[in-house]
Amino acid sequence: MDAGVIAKIKGRLRGKYSAWGCQRTCEQLTDGKRPEDVQIAADVQTCKKNLTRWLGEIREDMNAGAAKVAVRQMWVKTKLMGAWQRDKQIAATRKLKELFPQMDSTDYYVQVDG
């Protein structure tokens, strides 16, 4: 995954976390809690649940509309679209075998004859 896509995902995650945190804060203040007593859950289970849900929502958003077009344009500009071309996959797999001869061939997907 390229840095531009990661940056988009991280930005959207920050937005989702901010909205979630604001909502939790507002709920507690509305219920009469003093501001200094407001708490935001940060346990592993809550964080994993939120991250899983938010990444799913982000994936759906990025696979539709303008985000999909922007990612495609970024990949074309950085020549990452070439990663889907079979000849480039074969060349990368050969280089992988050369650099990491101990790696089991079942650890990667492109099958190269010879």
Image (tube, grey):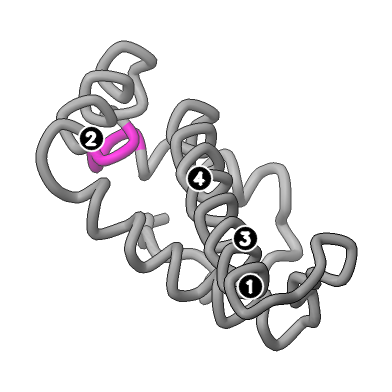
Q: Main secondary structure of the magenta part?
A: helix
The residue lying at 42 percent from left, 55 percent from top is: 114
Whole-angstrom CA distance, mark 1 to mark 4, is 40 Å
For residue 31, side relative to residue 53 (left or right)? right
Residue, disc 1: 104
Residue, disc 3: 21
Question: In terms of secondary structure, where does tag 3 sit?
Answer: helix
Say if mark 1 contacts mark 4, CB within 8 Å.
Answer: no
**114 in relation to 66, above or below:** below
- Which tag, 1 or 4, sits closer to the chain's start? 4
- Which tag, 4 or 2, sits closer to the chain's start? 4
From the viewer's perspective, is the residue at label 1 or at label 4 nearer?
Answer: 4
From the viewer's perspective, is the residue at label 1 or at label 2 nearer?
Answer: 2
Residue, disc 4: 15
Q: Is residue 86 magenta?
A: yes
| Range of residues picked out in magenta | 83-88
